[in-house]
Amino acid sequence: MVAHRLFFHLTWSTLDRRPMIDAPTRDFLVEFLKRTTIREGAQLIELAILRTHVHVIVRTPPRFDLGRLTQLLKGGSSHAASRLPGNVLGLRWTRRYSATTISPRALPRVTEYLKGQDSRHPGEGIPPDPRGSTG
């Protein structure tokens, strides 16, 4: 039995909530956020990406620098995505973010909340990439 089950819901938005995330940028972010979370010793549980903001649920060990992880997720993704070939939107995040703890009992409900983001934010969903990406 695992002694520690620490879950966090992280949310941050694009600068001035501008719609900077398109399908190719979303696809890049999915892989970038997964790789960075694993590299830092955490586990990505769920992810929701809209045109103007990102939701992430992570599981961390008991001694963990959540601020550092968030900095790497935000700053690293902005730096890398803005340099992708064909990225005409750029990617800049607001300085602030939200971090909320999630109890293990509430995890299924919060996971469903993330899965329903497209319907909660009409017009902010990201359509499939016309080049054939599945997102």
Image: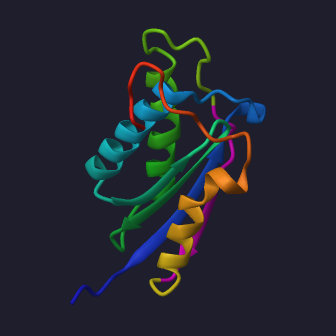
Vertical placement of residue 103 versus 38, above or below: below
In the image, the segment drawn in magenta is: 93-103
Left or right: 59, with 120 as reference point = left
Left or right: 3, with 126 as reference point = left
Which quarter of the rendering shows the N terminus? bottom left
Which quarter of the rendering shows the C terminus? top left
Q: Nearer the viewer, residue 14 or 68?
A: 14
User: Which of the 4 image quadrants contains residue 32?
Assistant: top left
Q: Which residue, as the protein is rendered here, is positioned at the far right?
A: 16
User: Which of the 4 image quadrants contains residue 109?
Assistant: bottom right
Residue at x-position 58% and y-position 36%: 126
Vertical placement of residue 128 versus 53, above or below: above
Image coordinates for residue 3, horizontal then vertical, percent = 28, 87
Left or right: 67, with 51 as reference point = left
Q: Check if residue 96 falls in the magenta segment.
A: yes
Q: Which residue, as the protein is rendered here, is positioned at the far left?
A: 1
Image coordinates for residue 8, horizontal then vertical, percent = 50, 67
Image coordinates for residue 91, horizontal then vertical, percent = 59, 25
Q: How many marks?
A: 0
Vertical placement of residue 109 versus 26, above or below: below
Residue at x-position 42% and y-position 33%: 27
Image coordinates for residue 130, horizontal then vertical, percent = 48, 21
Q: Nearer the viewer, residue 112 or 78?
A: 112
Residue at x-position 56% and y-position 61%: 114
Q: Check if residue 58 falls in the magenta segment.
A: no
Figure coloring: rainbow
